[in-house]
Amino acid sequence: MFEIRATALAGVMSLRAPASRDDRGSFQKLAHGPSLSAAGMRSDFAEIYCSTSLRDVVRGMHFQAPPHQHAKLVWCLEGRVTDVVLDLRSGRDSYGRALSLDLEGGGRNGVYVPEGCAHGFAVRSDHATLLYMVTSVHAPEADLGIRWDSFAFDWRIDRPILSARDRAHRPLAEFATPF
């Protein structure tokens, strides 16, 4: 059975997946609709992505704006990352606050990111592979981000490796939230 725990940000959940091992290898369940729904999470995933990244890569902080917003379930399949969620939901005391969770491949832990939150991560191992399950189809015109270093979070990386897109995101202070 899934272990699901609430975090300090409303709607952001820490998950631990059921898994089994034997002499053949391992088997792990990454989604179970009834368990997710019972905990108030969406399970109507429309797309699934997989990314690989090297040590000191920072990806984020990404989200899709309405009407293409999505919830996201993220698993680290290999390696180790610091996963970061930034609350962009207006009218909340937690607006602009970030929360981080350490995710490890084989550690069976994941994070659920609700609509209205930006998501990103920093790679702590030589490489990492992440799986993202999202509840809407990618819409390039709604695919936005917040600059990774523009809110109160210590990434603990001296020289991050960033995409040109992630370097160009606007800072949180200049962002007018649609959520």
Image (cartoon, helix red, strand yellow):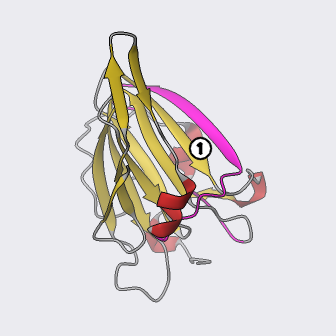
The residue shown at (43%, 26%) is 27
Q: Which residues are magenta?
A: 40-66
| Residue 68 spot, x, y in % from top left | 72, 64
Is 64 or 173 nearer to us in this picture?
Answer: 64
In terms of image quadrants, where is residue 99?
bottom left
Q: Which is nearer the eye, 65 or 103?
A: 103
Relative to 90, say whether 43 is above or below. Answer: above
Question: Which residue appears farthest toward the top when viewing the image?
Answer: 23
Is disc 1 placed on a helix, strand or loop? helix
Task: Determine the image quadrant of residue 151.
Answer: bottom left
Q: Residues within 10 Å of mark 1 (few under 14, many from 20)?
A: few
**Residue type, mark 1 in image:** Arg
Judged left or right of residue 48, residue 98 is left
- Residue found 55% across the figure and 43% down from its top: 132
Nearest the eye: 28 or 12: 28
x, y percent for residue 12: 40, 65
The residue at 39%/73% (across/down) is 96
Please tell me whether residue 88 is drawn above or below residue 101 in the rendered image. below
**What residue occupies the far bottom of the structure in this picture?**
91
Residue 44 placement (x, y as % from top left): 66, 58
Q: Tell me what residue is drawn at x 47 percent, y 63 percent.
A: 171
Side (left or right) of 124 relative to 72: left
Q: Which residue is mark 1?
A: 165
Indicate whether residue 63 is drawn in magenta: yes
Give the quadrant of the C terminus: bottom right
Residue 150 visible? The answer is no
Kindly tell me whether residue 100 is visible in this rendering: yes
For residue 139: magenta? no
Residue 52 position within the rendered picture, expressed as x and y whole percent measured from the top left: 50, 26
Q: How many marks?
A: 1
Between residues 6 and 142, which one lies in front from this camera angle?
6
